[in-house]
């Protein structure tokens, strides 16, 4: 299961991640930045999550498409 982190402080709210992988990423209603959906969030941190194996390609595509390269998959 891939671990995902988002450097939310550097997010530009472009929407690439939540458009390309809405099953895992969404726009935060509080600040407009990208966040991990509640289902996959770890420790209540909107910047950290664990992606199920069936979403690995989707999450990686979102990370690869991020223009400011703030999504990290390991």
Image (cartoon, grey):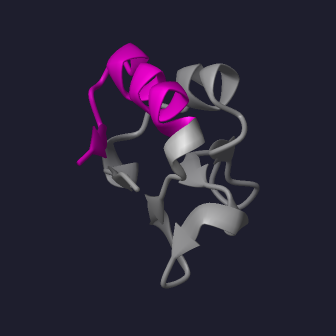
Considering only vertical position in the picture, is 40 above or below 9? Answer: below
In-image side of 66 versus 68 (left or right)? right
In-image side of 36 versus 70 (left or right)? right
Residue lying at 56% horizontally and 46% vertically, measured from the top left: 33
Q: Residue 68 is drawn in which quadrant?
A: top left
- Image coordinates of residue 66 in percent, x first then y, are 39, 21
Q: Residue 31 is drawn in which quadrant?
A: bottom right
The single residue placed furthest to the bottom in the displayed view is 43
In-image side of 59 versus 15 (left or right)? left
Residue lying at 68% horizontally and 44% vertically, measured from the top left: 26
How many discs mark residues in the rendered view?
0
Quadrant into which the N terminus falls: bottom left
- Image coordinates of residue 43 in percent, x first then y, are 48, 84
Taking depth in this image into account, of 31 and 40 the one nearest to the observer is: 40
Residue 8 included in the magenta stretch of the image: no
Residue 68 included in the magenta stretch of the image: yes
- Image coordinates of residue 42 in percent, x first then y, are 49, 75
Q: Which residues are magenta?
A: 55-74
Considering only vertical position in the picture, is 13 above or below 9? Answer: above
Residue lying at 57% horizontally and 55% vertically, measured from the top left: 36
In-image side of 19 versus 68 (left or right)? right
- Image coordinates of residue 54 in percent, x first then y, are 58, 39
Residue lying at 67% horizontally and 57% vertically, measured from the top left: 37
The single residue placed furthest to the right in the displayed view is 29
């Amino acid at each position: 299961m891939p671990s995902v982190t988002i450097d939310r402080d550097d997010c530009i709210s472009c929407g690439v991640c939540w458009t390309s992988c809405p099953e895992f990423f969404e726009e935060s209603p509080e600040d407009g930045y990208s966040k991990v959906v509640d289902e996959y969030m770890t420790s209540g941190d909107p910047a950290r999550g664990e992606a199920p194996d069936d979403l690995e390609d989707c999450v990686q595509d979102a990370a690869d498409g991020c223009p400011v390269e703030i999504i990290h998959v390991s």
